[in-house]
Amino acid sequence: MNTPSKKPATLPAYFQRRMNMENLLASRRVLQLVYEQGPLTQAEAARALKLSQGACNLHFQRLEYEGLVYGQRLQPEGRGRPRFRWELSRAQNATIGLVFDPPHLFVQLEDFAGQKALTLEANLKSCRTPAEIAEKVSASVTRALAVAQERSLLVREVYAALPGVLDTLTGAVRRAVNFPALDGLDVQELLQTKFKLSAHANSLGVAYYYGEAAEIPANQTALVIYWDLGLGLVFGRNRQLLTLQGGDARGRMLSELGHISIAADGPRCRCGQRGCLEAYAGGWVLLQRFVKYGVQTLEDLTQLAATGKPGVDAAIRELTHLLGLHLAGALQMFGVTVVRVTGPLAPVFARGQAAFVDGLAAVIGAERAASLFVAVSHDVSDRLLRGATRAARHAYIYPEEFARLSRVSSTLQGQHLAGG
Ligand SMILES: [Zn+2]
């Protein structure tokens, strides 16, 4: 088995002169290359990055010192310096994902190889204020850090996935429609100041996307629809979220498509506008619509859908057809080839999947619609948690991309609420 080489106690003095040890930036490209294509030799890295082998060697040694990579010694070719094949230290590095799914908080610790080290759940039901929630978060994170320490895992990054409307810059919750105790909660700040952790707080949509990303083939552009109490949309390609900066100062994302207005005089949406797509198809609307069947929760709704009652089935097909009609333009614009549907209402979508494709076909033509790969996700909550730890891993390896994301989106869902 590959065992990591021992971490050198100190770096040679010449490192201090030749490298900025304060941040990882200079070595980041080498780290990204190992993450994407490792294991590789320094000659291969030098070729790929158009750097000298000497420079690559410095970066590898530095990354090894930081505990991020390890070198396996290769058989020497005649005389000369030893050669190494460098690999990411997947089993030594970890991230934590927090998923706020009121009234539950899920916390997962996972290493870079995708091995779960801990999953725990806290109930927030009794919490009335963000301070009370912060205490529960602290207790859970403390526990996760203790497990990380026991297992000699280095926690590199935390991703907190939150519902509701979030502050553009900080990820603090501005308004959580369905769980007001979250209002004002700033998880990123809590993790940074109290635990000195590198952390990002952003929407559930990011975690949903990374939960699906492993299933999306390379170089395919995907739309991930997450259907819960609201209706969220995330576009991504090659494990990167695609964002589109719009005309307003907050830099809207196209992902707020759930709130495009499809009828000026349509029903009132919870965002205040009329006729949003979400006002027809959001989970909160469906709960009202199917209340006559005794439906109170999203779970009741999936159970009702599973019965296949003709009236219910027809209503579901009508909804998914509507989604197809109104998402077709965005699919064309982004060149989407893969659609994945997730969230607690994914099983409901499955019953109307054919009608969704029909809706698309009405706009983009049957051939193009049929060429799309549409799939409904399973193990939705498990994927969401994994998605949060993977979003954290991605944020650690590609920090500039995540910095851009947090500038661009306050939330992927219902963002224009932010001003109101
Ligand atoms: Zn709306």
Image: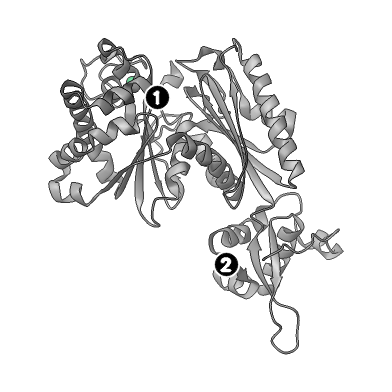
What is the CA distance from the residue labelled 1 to the residue labelled 2?
Answer: 40 Å
Looking at the rendering, which quadrant does residue 351 occupy? top left
Query: In terms of depth relative to the viewer, which is nearer, 55 or 312?
Result: 312
Location of residue 142 with respect to 404 vertically, above or below: above
Ligand 1 lies in quarter: top left
**Residue depicted at x 54% and y 44%:** 390
Residue 87 placement, left or right of 310: right
Whether the residue under disc 1 has CB within 8 Å of ligand 1 = yes
Query: In terms of depth relative to the viewer, which is nearer, 143 or 83?
Result: 143
Q: Quadrant of the C terminus?
A: top left
- Numbered disc 1: secondary structure: loop
Looking at the rendering, which quadrant does residue 12 occupy? bottom right
State the image coordinates of residue 222 (x, y, percent, origin top left). Answer: 35, 46
State the image coordinates of residue 158 (x, y, percent, origin top left). Answer: 62, 37
Residue 178 placement, left or right of 392: left
State the image coordinates of residue 220 (x, y, percent, origin top left). Answer: 35, 54
Q: Amino acid at mark 2?
A: Leu
Q: Amino acid at mark 1?
A: Gly
Decide which of tag 1 and tag 2 comes sooner along the chain. 2
The residue pinned by badge 1 equals: 414
The residue pinned by badge 2 equals: 49
Label 1 CA crowd tier, 10 Å (few <14, some 14–19, many 20+): many
Q: Nearer the viewer, mark 1 or mark 2?
A: 1
Q: How is the image coloured?
A: one colour
Q: Quadrant of the N terminus?
A: bottom right
